[in-house]
Image: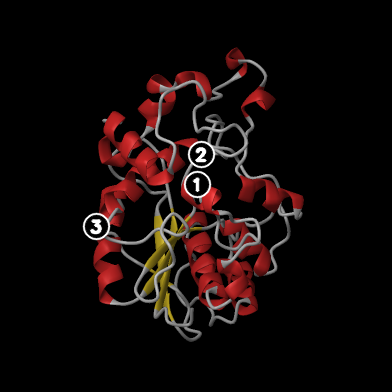
Amino acid sequence: MTRFARFVAIDWSGAKGARHKGIAVALCEAGDAVPQLVAAPSSIWSRQAVADWLVDAGRQAPTLFGFDFSFAPPFVARGGYLPGDPVPEDGPAFWAYVDTICEDVDLGAASLLEVAHRRHFYFGKADGVKAAFMHNRVCEALYNAGGGGKPSTVYDAIGAAQVAKASFAGMRMLHHLRGKLPVWPFDPLPDAGSVVVEIYTSIAARAAGRPKGRSKMRDAAALNDALAALGSAAHDGAMPDDHGADAIVTAAWMRRTAAEPALWTPAMLTAQIARTEGWTFGVI
């Protein structure tokens, strides 16, 4: 796993529209140099621009790319992604389905939640008891059981902390990467070349010494303390926003942990889970 030459963390966004201030891309090479934010080609990133950049960057050098959205909905617990609706039953086929039915601009997927499969998503009290929508993947349940905290489910579509729109938009992006970059664990980990994985920025923050529930770094001292804990040099520019800080620290964490075999072979990661739900890198 030391074969990776570069490490990239992407703080993602599912917001409607063609450009998204919530997207941040941080890159670092092997060693201890501080991760740098990658400038968007048009000042503000679009999701399509990230996908295009990813393919080009992945060809230039063996790179580990990490995205902070759920690569698939839960499947194992209920035997399907959207029980009762006829949809594919493996990750890549489901990504293709999402891309086919969504006409939202810039790989957006809000229409899937708001129209096409509305009954599966919680938007407020009118939808009933929220607990009835709180389904999790195996890796999410394991993360929670280990004290990491309860991850958001892709079926919760309300509030600032929801990851639903970002995740389904991300699935469209993963479909566009199909055949260009392997996505672990839906694809086997290759012996060489670049790989895309799912990450939780909160895992990186905790590894960097940030207290549970206080993962956000809003000043240079907090950011540099986190980087130092991960063996990285200090950030030497203007203080980035929350998204940029998350991406910078997570890229440094990926560099530090990518060579750990246990993170690539979680005991609970079965062939069925790899095919349907996927896994979050760092959860063991």
In the image, residue 34 lies at what x, y percent?
Answer: 48, 78
Q: How many angstroms separate mark 1 from mark 2 (CA)?
A: 7 Å
Q: Nearer the viewer, residue 148 or 85?
A: 85
Q: Amino acid at mark 1?
A: Ser
Question: Which secondary structure lies at badge 3?
Answer: helix
**Residue toward you, 227 or 113:** 113
Which residue shows up at 49% across the image and 44% down it?
A: 276
**Mark 2 surroundings within 10 Å by alpha-carbon count, few (fewer than 14), some (14 through 19), many (20 or more):** many
Regarding mark 1 in the picture, which secondary structure is present there?
loop
Q: Are marks 1 and 2 in contact (CB under 8 Å)?
A: yes
The residue sitting at the front extreme is 271
Task: List the single residue furthest toward the bottom.
Answer: 31
> How is the protein colored in the picture?
secondary structure
Q: CA distance from mark 3 to mark 1?
A: 20 Å
Q: Nearer the viewer, residue 34 or 67?
A: 67
Q: Are marks 3 and 2 in contact (CB under 8 Å)?
A: no
Q: What residue is disc 1 on? A: 70
x and y, in percent, of residue 50 in the image = 30, 56
Q: Residue at x 36, y 76 (%)?
A: 192
**Disc 2 element:** loop
